[in-house]
Amino acid sequence: MSDHLSAIVMEPQRRDSILARTRQIIRKNLPPMEGWFLKRDDIFSYVRPSAGAFVYCEYKSIFVDVDGNGKFDSPLPKIKFIF
């Protein structure tokens, strides 16, 4: 079914309008999201998409006092995700 729907969407009469709509959404939503990540560059690393709509970002490892002993030697694991 998904192949059938993809074929319909990518028909020449629909393709241009769908791609234009997608580009418009990306142009509108990417700058605020990018700004949010860049303001928090101490917490996140961020790779701006070179094409398409996928953003790669990583929650940087931080050290926490897990045992309450004043030693910040237990890092949380890095978390990677794609938007």
Image (cartoon, rainbow, N blue to C red):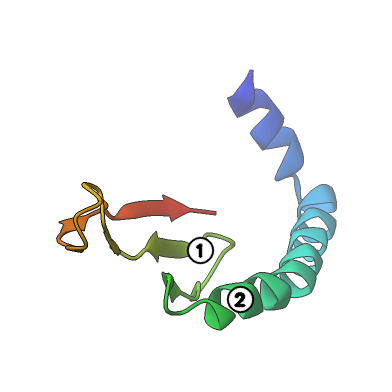
Measured from the top left, where is residue 19 in percent x and y? Answer: 74, 59
Measured from the top left, where is residue 10 in percent x and y? Answer: 70, 45
Task: Look at label 1 and name its amino acid.
Answer: Val
Q: Which residue is mark 1?
A: 55
Q: Is residue 15 above or below residue 29?
A: above
**Residue toward you, 40 or 20:** 40
Q: Quadrant of residue 46?
A: bottom left
Measured from the top left, where is residue 78 in percent x and y? Answer: 28, 55
Which residue is at 21% across, 62% downward? 70
**Residue toward you, 34 or 17:** 34
Q: How many marks?
A: 2
**For residue 57, side relative to residue 29 (left or right):** left
- Circle 2 packing at 10 Å, graded few (<14), some (14-19), many (20+), is some
Which residue is at 52% across, 59% downward? 54
Q: Is residue 81 above or below residue 40?
A: above
Q: Are marks 2 and 1 in contact (CB under 8 Å)?
A: yes
**For residue 74, side relative to residue 36 (left or right):** left
Task: Look at label 2 and name its amino acid.
Answer: Glu
The tag on residue 66 is: none
**Residue toward you, 6 or 52:** 52
Q: Which residue is mark 2?
A: 34
Measured from the top left, where is residue 61 in percent x and y? Answer: 28, 62
